[in-house]
């Protein structure tokens, strides 16, 4: 997903153009969700340190309000994300928007020569925008300049729109979206209201109760519309659309920019949605129309619809922070919502009226036309009792909870407590008692917190968290401060991620700092138009003449318009100084294990068929070479020399001293000999079907392969099925099946260093070794994985692979398909630089560290991620920000040398509170996992487990300390940004890599550890804490648009606990590399027939791995949902359907990690344990 | 002035210690080169590793001599280092060649600082003990005179 400057690109049309020449699969991985900027609690306004004592005590009541508005600030930052394309012209910071033309050019595969490409694009987008948005943008500008004026109403409305699922803040960045998520369907309004209560439980209670003290009547009345907000919004649009003819809307819309009446303005914005994209509307079934008008959809069609409304809110943001006083005055003046929306305010200045539409959105008409419309339009509302039976039950529990703790804020010091909590919340610093809040999981994907650099422009261009992510979004100014916060400091980077939008620059001079060789980036400082100051070493450098040239205007001057300054993720086409030798061709060599076990497993059939299918899609140019070696106790070379009718097999029995029988015909040009290669692939499965050789000489085969690829480098793919027990590098079976519940340290480490040494040799010859392990017994991954770990390869594991097991075959097929067609970079190195005062201590991933900051990666693939630990060596207090820059130099499969540069800039924090509030819990878990793998290999598994618990204890203790509270409370307090940390830690302790007590095969454990080190964070998190969705009521769930502009129902995420399962339901678990659908026994008949396509519950086979495509809506809906989940992954993963009484049941149940499993604590018990430890 | 066994072992220790000082200087420089990116860790480990065992053996050898000569005090001063060496070698990473440095892990910051600190401390220890051996040699000679 392209977020080079923090901007999500609408997928849809763009994606395929990017894929261009590579393949459909190779540039996947974008999220089709209109990615709303999260509301990181760290994004606090700079004025944050207003001492509470300075505020008049009467503010107490306002505190809640302030906070809600404070939140708005954040949503403001997210708004531009929602609508990238159209905004580009009006907001100067986002000039690069991926228009289609540009995207094509920027695809790294397409030979792209011009340096002015990005700028060309700029022009285009600008033109586009101008047409469509001229009036809007002008309005916006006015708005932004005058938002202080709209104080009361606007703030009030925002407050209410947010008051609902407030604590879910980090997951969503958009005001409009929030209510929807927790509300679910709005066909039955009463239920919605009830449901909302528990969600907003503690915090809202505090908030609204504080409000009530002042103005009970007002708050009550206004709370009501809030809760039904989504429906309100929806219904708001609905009738207007259906009642008014299109033309008039358009007309109105034209006026809108000029008119000062709120009444007139509100409709156009809604209407425009439909008028601009009527096809969307048309394609939905009638029943969905009301859903369709949910905010998500608006966001998809952003450009015309939302901007004016939602930008208005953001603009208000910053000012709101200044403002308790405003609110004070504002509060009493809160008029019942729709008096605002329906009555125009002709007296007010124009900008303030522009806000009214928003009030209209959030608060307004639900009462007027909301309920009737939704009811009339929605037939399924009959099923209301069926819908959220589960959430309802949850909600009951929550209600009980709330009622059992009637006074949840009694934990705060009584004196001034309200003020303090209000303020805490204002700055996003609210804390959550984990013991009282069992349901901490946000209903939607957790959005990473973004760094707040104080300047909107810089925030926009900062590196996307999908690519570069830090465990804290504010770097502590000194190591002692870091030490106090007890947080690990580190970075996770996914440098070669498939991006939809990537500016590619071809220029003669790549501008770099003369002393530290940093690439010029958006965070440098221009001393004057001729010089720039490096942000890493602070040296002042000259700007080359060329850099002054602005290709857009064809003039000299203003270097800040260059694409290098406008995007922190950028790719250069490197001139010849960056080559040690001519760029290498793409070379692929396959090593196939053909020992008895391997042949029995039947993997050769799958391998051959997939490779045959994809052989023309392998990334590469005309020089691409390919070769195949098979090995059992001997090596079988296949000569593909010119003039042969069919491949010649040559068997070398002497494996101690490897030689190549015909050095030149083994690795051949793919284009020239494609027929021979296809013949060979067709022959392969049959050729070895009668073998009884039980030995596998992996070491010798690797040595031979190393010899073959010595001169070129390339990619070596090894398929290993049995234990490599023969020849050089032989290992013995050392796993004791009775000791599987734990793992001795020595078993986690290799027995010999043969593979490591060979990997280092391969690495220096630019050969990467990728392992596919399809074992059914122990193969000692601990030892043989060394060949991949130190040569920058990847490891894929398919335990118990058998041709007769459709599940494993499917998983292998899909993975191998993706593997063959994904992008690849050869002879790569990555260097990570950071601002002076910081050092990078430790790297995690598959590579060889060639010098302190240089990773040697013979190959780089889009699914490889890396982690690094950072230490603070000097006091950073003088700096405003620190920067990290990762530069990846590689040769593309087309033989082009390229440099991909990512720059991440983070602000400095000087208080403990700041540091803790800026924590990024997922990133912390990602880094901790990597560190724990090291720990378990060097010390022991139980040490690593202890370290996890210690981190949880230390962090929570540090937080408690930072709160500096008078009386110790009974619960476990966690800040909003760390509320999931204990949950994740208790989950990671049950991850196959670290679990104890549950029998885990040593190979599986090792593979899980490798994943921990190399998987990108978003996949890793799903492995650690899978996403669980109820799918039995998809028709009632909230809708978003996918990349093809189709609506997809997205159910809320559930906790991984059996309390969330229900007997009548069906649940989908997304574990990152596979998905499972668990069908409970009492699921409705209709679900079985219409969705799963089986006649009877027991007809769900044990090997059911796909859902048939039926011509029924529920079935389509599920398919859409699954595709939607798959869209975020590198490839479509395997799906397994599990019946409650099938033997595979335990695979699903063991993932319910919040429950008590054998020998491991449940989440609640874990919290209790933490509670005793936290001081 | 007779030349007894104690004096002989001190002389050997002196000569050996001079070598050890050179070893540890080399060690410190090599690790520093790694830190400052001058050398490839593979090459550097290849040059460092062959020196490890000779250093340990040389150190142990003259300590055994000293012990045989009855210089127990000197021996006990050196005993911790001997034990440290044994432990260091025992816990070395799995590798087929001699030595204790593994190019894949040496670049980790904690490893690197450990090695550097080890080098400096040993250098200091060897330097001090050089003068101590000199003193011990003189004392041993004096004792033999009496």
Image (spheres, coloured by chain):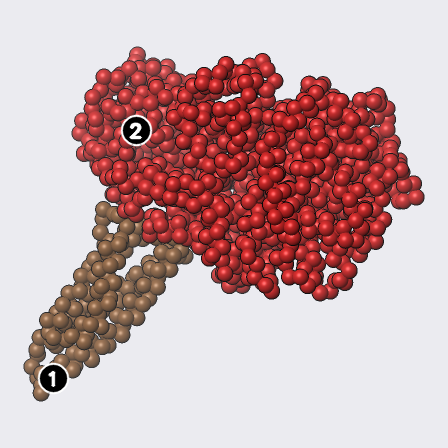
Crowd class of label 2 (few under 14; some 14 to 19; many from 20; radius 10 Å):
some
Which residue in the protein does label 1 denote? B143
Chain to which mark 1 belongs? B
**Residue A170 seen in the current view:** no
**In x, y percent, where is residue B126?**
26, 70
Kindly indicate the quadrant of the structure image that contains residue B136.
Answer: bottom left
**Residue A974 seen in the current view:** yes
Write the residue at 54% across / 50% down.
A435
Write the residue at 81% across / 46% down.
A218
Nearer to us in this view, A767 or A924: A924
The correct choice, above or below, for A667 with respect to A155 in the image is above
**In x, y percent, where is residue A1001?**
32, 36
The correct choice, above or below, for A1114 with respect to A313 in the image is above
Q: Which chain is brown?
A: B
* Secondary structure beneath label 1: helix
- Please name the color used to draw chain A: red
Which residue in the protein does label 2 denote? A776
Q: Which mark is residue A874?
A: none
* Secondary structure beneath label 2: loop
Chain to which mark 2 belongs? A
């Amino acid at each position: 997903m392209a977020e080079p400057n923090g901007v999500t690109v609408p997928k849809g049309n763009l994606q395929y153009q990017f894929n261009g020449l590579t393949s459909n699969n190779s540039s996947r991985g974008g999220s089709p969700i209109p990615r709303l900027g999260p509301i990181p609690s760290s994004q606090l306004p700079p004025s944050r340190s207003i001492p509470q004592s300075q505020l008049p005590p009467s503010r107490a009541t306002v505190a809640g309000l302030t906070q809600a508005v404070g939140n708005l600030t954040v949503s403001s930052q997210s708004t531009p994300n929602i609508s990238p394309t159209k905004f580009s012209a009006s907001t100067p910071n986002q000039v690069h928007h991926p228009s289609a033309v540009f995207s094509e050019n920027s695809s790294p595969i397409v030979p792209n020569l011009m340096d002015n490409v990005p700028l060309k694009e700029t022009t285009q987008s600008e033109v586009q925008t101008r047409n469509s948005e001229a009036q809007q943008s002008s309005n916006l500008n006015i708005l932004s300049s005058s938002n202080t004026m709209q104080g009361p109403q606007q703030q009030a409305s925002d407050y209410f729109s947010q008051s609902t699922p407030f604590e879910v803040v980090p997951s969503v960045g958009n005001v409009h979206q929030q209510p929807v998520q927790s509300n679910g369907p709005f066909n039955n309004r009463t239920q919605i209201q009830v449901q909302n209560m528990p969600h907003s439980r503690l915090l809202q209670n505090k908030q609204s109760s504080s409000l009530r003290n002042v103005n009970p009547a007002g708050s009550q009345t206004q709370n009501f519309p809030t809760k039904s907000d989504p429906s309100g919004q929806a219904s708001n649009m609905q009738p207007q659309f259906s009642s008014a003819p299109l033309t008039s809307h358009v007309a109105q819309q034209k006026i809108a920019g000029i008119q000062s009446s709120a009444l007139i303005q509100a409709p156009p914005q809604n209407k425009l949605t439909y008028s601009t994209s009527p096809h969307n509307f048309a394609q939905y079934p009638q029943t969905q129309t009301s859903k369709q008008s949910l905010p998500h959809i608006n966001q998809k069609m952003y450009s015309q619809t939302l901007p004016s409304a939602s930008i208005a809110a953001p603009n208000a943001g910053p000012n709101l922070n200044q403002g308790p006083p405003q609110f004070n005055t504002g509060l009493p003046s809160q008029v019942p919502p729709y008096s605002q929306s329906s009555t125009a305010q002709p007296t007010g200045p124009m900008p303030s009226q522009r806000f009214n539409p928003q009030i209209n959105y959030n608060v307004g008409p639900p009462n007027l036309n909301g309920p009737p419309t939704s009811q009339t339009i929605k037939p399924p509302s009959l099923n209301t009792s069926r819908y959220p039976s589960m959430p309802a039950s949850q909600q009951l529990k929550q209600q009980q909870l709330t009622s059992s703790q009637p006074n949840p804020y009694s934990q705060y010091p009584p004196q001034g407590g309200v003020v303090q909590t209000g303020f805490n919340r204002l700055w996003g610093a609210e804390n959550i008692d984990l013991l009282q809040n069992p349901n901490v999981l946000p209903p939607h994907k957790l959005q990473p917190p973004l760094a707040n650099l104080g300047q909107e422009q810089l925030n926009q261009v900062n590196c996307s968290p999908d690519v570069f992510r830090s465990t804290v979004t504010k770097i502590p100014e000194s190591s002692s401060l870091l030490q106090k916060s007890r947080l690990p400091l580190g970075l996770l980077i996914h440098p070669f991620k498939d991006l939809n939008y990537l500016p590619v620059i071809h220029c003669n001079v790549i501008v770099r700092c003369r002393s530290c060789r940093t690439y010029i980036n958006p965070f440098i400082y221009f001393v004057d138009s001729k010089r720039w100051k490096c942000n890493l070493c602070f040296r002042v450098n000259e700007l080359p003449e060329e850099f002054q040239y602005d290709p857009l205007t064809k003039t000299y001057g203003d270097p800040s318009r260059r694409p290098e300054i406008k995007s922190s993720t950028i790719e250069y086409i490197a001139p010849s100084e960056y080559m040690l030798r001519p760029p290498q061709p793409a070379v692929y060599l396959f090593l196939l294990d053909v020992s008895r076990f391997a042949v029995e497993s039947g993997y050769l059939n799958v391998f051959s068929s997939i490779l045959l299918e994809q052989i023309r899609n392998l990334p590469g140019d005309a020089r691409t070479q390919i070769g195949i070696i098979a090995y059992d106790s001997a090596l079988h070379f296949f000569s593909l020399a010119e003039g042969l009718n069919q491949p010649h097999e040559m068997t070398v029995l002497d494996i101690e001293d490897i030689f190549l029988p015909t050095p030149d015909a083994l690795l051949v040009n793919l284009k020239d000999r494609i027929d021979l290669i296809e013949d060979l692939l067709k022959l392969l499965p049959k050729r070895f079907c009668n073998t009884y050789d039980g030995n596998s000489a992996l070491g010798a085969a690797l040595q031979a392969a190393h010899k073959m690829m010595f001169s070129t480098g390339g990619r070596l793919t090894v398929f290993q099925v049995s234990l490599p027990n023969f020849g050089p590098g032989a290992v013995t079976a050392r796993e004791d099946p009775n000791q599987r519940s734990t793992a001795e340290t020595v078993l986690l480490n290799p027995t010999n260093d043969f593979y490591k040494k060979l990997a280092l040799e391969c690495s220096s010859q630019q050969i990467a070794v990728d392992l596919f392990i399809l074992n059914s017994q122990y193969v000692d991954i601990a030892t043989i994985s060394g060949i991949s770990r130190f040569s920058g390869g990847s490891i894929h594991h398919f335990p118990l692979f058998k041709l007769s097991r459709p599940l494993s075959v499917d998983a292998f097929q899909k993975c191998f398909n993706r593997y063959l067609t994904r992008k690849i970079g050869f002879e790569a190195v990555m260097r990570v630089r950071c601002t002076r005062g910081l050092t990078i201590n430790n790297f995690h991933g598959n590579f060889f560290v060639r010098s302190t900051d240089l990773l040697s990666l013979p190959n780089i693939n889009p699914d490889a991620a890396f982690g690094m630990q950072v230490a603070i060596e000097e006091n950073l207090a003088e700096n405003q920000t620190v920067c990290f820059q990762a530069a990846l130099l590689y040769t593309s499969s087309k033989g082009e040398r390229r440099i991909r540069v990512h720059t991440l800039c983070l602000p400095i924090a000087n208080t403990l509170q700041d540091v803790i509030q800026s924590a990024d819990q997922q990133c912390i878990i990602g880094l901790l996992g990597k560190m724990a793998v090291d720990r378990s290999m060097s010390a022991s598994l139980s040490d690593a487990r202890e370290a996890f618990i210690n981190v949880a204890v230390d962090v929570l203790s540090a937080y408690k300390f930072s709160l500096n509270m008078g009386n110790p409370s009974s619960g476990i307090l966690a800040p909003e940004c760390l509320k999931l940390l204990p949950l994740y830690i208790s989950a990671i302790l049950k991850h196959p890599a670290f679990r104890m007590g549950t029998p885990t095969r040593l190979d599986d454990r090792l593979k899980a550890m490798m994943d921990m080190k190399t998987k990108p964070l978003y996949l890793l998190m799903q492995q650690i804490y899978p996403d669980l969705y109820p799918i039995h009521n998809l028709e009632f769930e909230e809708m978003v648009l996918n990349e093809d502009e189709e609506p997809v129902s997205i159910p809320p995420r559930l906790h991984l606990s059996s309390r969330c399962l229900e007997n009548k339901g069906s649940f989908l678990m997304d574990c990152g590399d596979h998905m499972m659908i668990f069908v409970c026994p009492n699921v409705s008949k209709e679900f079985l027939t219409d969705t799963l396509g089986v006649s009877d519950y027991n007809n769900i086979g044990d090997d059911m791995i796909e859902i048939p495509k039926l011509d029924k809506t529920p079935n389509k809906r599920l398919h859409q949902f699954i595709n939607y989940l798959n869209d975020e992954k590198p490839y479509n993963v395997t799906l397994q359907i599990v019946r409650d009484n099938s033997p595979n049941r335990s695979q699903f149940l063991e993932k319910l990690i919040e429950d008590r499993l054998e020998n491991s604590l449940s989440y609640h018990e874990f919290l209790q344990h933490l509670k005793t430890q936290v001081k | 002035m007779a030349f007894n066994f104690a004096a002989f072992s001190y002389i050997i220790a002196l000569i050996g210690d001079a070598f050890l000082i050179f070893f540890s200087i080399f060690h410190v420089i090599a690790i520093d080169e790694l830190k400052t990116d001058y050398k490839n860790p593979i090459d550097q480990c290849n040059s460092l590793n062959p020196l490890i065992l000779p250093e340990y053996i040389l150190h142990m050898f003259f300590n055994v001599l000293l012990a045989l000569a009855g210089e127990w005090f000197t021996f006990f001063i050196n005993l911790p280092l001997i034990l440290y060496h044994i432990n260091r070698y025992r816990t070395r990473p799995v590798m087929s060649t001699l030595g204790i440095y593994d190019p894949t892990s040496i670049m980790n910051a904690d490893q690197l600082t450990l090695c550097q600190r080890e080098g400096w401390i040993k250098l200091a220890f060897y330097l001090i003990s050089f003068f101590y051996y000199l003193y011990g040699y003189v004392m041993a000679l004096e004792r033999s005179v009496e």
